[in-house]
Image (spheres, grey):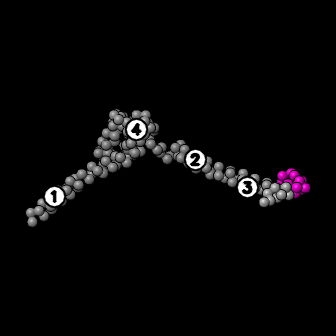
Amino acid sequence: MIRSHRLVAFFFCLAGIVAFSFPAVAQVDRARQIGGKFMCMCGCNQVLTQCNHVGCTTSTAMLKELDQSVARGDSEDVITQGFVQEFGTKVYAEPPKSGLSLVAWVLPSVYLLIGTVLVVFIISRWRSRVLGEPATAGGASGFSVEELERARRRVARDTED
């Protein structure tokens, strides 16, 4: 009986610890999600949350600032604006999809579409030109009918078993 009371007390303590630490876990996840949208400004060209330089003071300071902003309850937009004001637009890991950046996002698809249409157009022109050519007396090769027939006989004679 005493064991069951200890077991129940243990589970209540465990539930309390989990409930107490849940907001901290949510903050860490939120900070990691937001930090994945920024680049580390040390020059490594890595995402802030994935900078693997030993002793990188830049990523440490940026992550500390990010954690403080998340702990204060700042919105993602406020945090983003703060980093952009401090480091400029180069802090974005992925440029925002607006303005000139939107053009940079759309142009590869437009170029692919234009290229595909151009290739289909060129191939259809080649096919119509080949199909529409009049046949010459010796065919498309320019050889006479007698020369082609002589070559066929010779090939047939040389390949007989």
The residue wearing badge 1 is: 10
- State the SS at label 1: helix
Instruction: Identify the amino acid type marked 3.
Output: Ser
- Distance, label 2 to label 3, CA atoms, is 24 Å
Q: Residues within 10 Å of mark 4 (few under 14, many from 20)?
A: many
The residue wearing badge 2 is: 108
Determine if residue 99 is in view. Answer: no
Total numbered labels: 4
| Residue name at image x 90 percent, y 55 percent | 146
Q: Are marks 4 and 1 in contact (CB under 8 Å)?
A: no
Q: Position of residue 106 (x, y in %)?
A: 56, 48
Q: Earlier in the sequence, mark 3 or mark 1?
A: 1
In terms of image quadrants, where is residue 130?
A: bottom right
Magenta region: 138-152
The residue wearing badge 4 is: 40
In terms of image quadrants, where is residue 42?
A: top left
Q: Earlier in the sequence, mark 3 or mark 4?
A: 4
